[in-house]
Image (cartoon, rainbow, N blue to C red):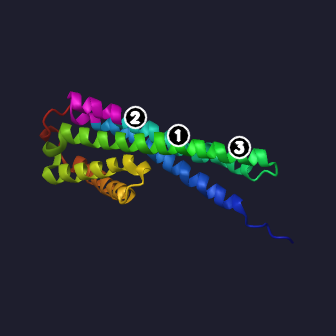
Amino acid sequence: MRRARAGPAPVRTAVVAWFTVLTLSAALFAPIAIGVRRLSTGRTMRLAVVAGIAAAAVQVIGLSRWPLLVPGYAADATSADPAVAASARDAFDTAHQVLGHLVGETFGYLLTAAWTLLVLAAVGRQLAGRWFTVLGAASAVLILAGVLSPLDLPGVDLANFAGYMLWSSWLVAFAVVLVRTPRPALPGVRV
């Protein structure tokens, strides 16, 4: 009995699966942005909702290239026809630059940072105090550094990574604060 060869198919399947998970996770940013809207009725929070939904959309667009486009490019890139292979590599490079770097990353960084800063401006200190505002603002600034990534400046990618690590901590803290804070104690809260 012949054993099936381990080849690129399992790797391709894993890449598609994990990028699908990332894409779905990014999509969850939209309902979070909408749900947080209940914390304030002000204009700043309305702008935050728009920024949050837009951040989710651009990140979904950027990440979707991996499960939707890349498998086809990869298959064509291994074609025996050099023209087909070259075309697939060119198409991948274009999708990576436009959908990945420009749309998903650059606009994703910008809009994620904007959402965070707008939420902080709308409810920051009154929700959880100075630590909450400082943690959120620091993470947003470090995330925003990611827009400089195409310039290959030293430390930018590390700053962006650190920003997302802090931002994840801030989101967890935000969830804990929301669960533990009675709604009537927040000024301007709609019930």
In this view, 187 is above or below 169: above
Give the label, 3 or 2, closer to the camera.
Answer: 3
The span shown in magenta is: 37-51
In the image, what residue occupies the spot 78% across and 49% down? 82
Few, some or many C-alpha atoms within 10 Å of disc 3 (few <14, some 14-19, many ≥20)?
Answer: some
Q: Which numbered disc, 1 or 3, marks the residue that appears first in the sequence?
A: 3
Residue named by callout 3: 87
Residue named by callout 2: 54
Q: Secondary structure at mark 3?
A: helix
The CA distance from mark 1 to mark 3 is: 16 Å
Task: Pick the residue in front: 91 or 3.
Answer: 91
Q: Amino acid at mark 1?
A: Val
Q: Quadrant of residue 39?
A: top left
The CA distance from mark 3 to mark 2 is: 31 Å
In the image, what residue occupies the spot 21% across and 33% down? 40
Q: In the picture provided, is 46 more to the left or to the right than 70?
A: left
Q: Amino acid at mark 3?
A: Ser
Residue named by callout 1: 98
Q: Secondary structure at mark 1?
A: helix
Looking at the image, the residue that sits furthest to the right is 1
Count of numbered circles on the image: 3
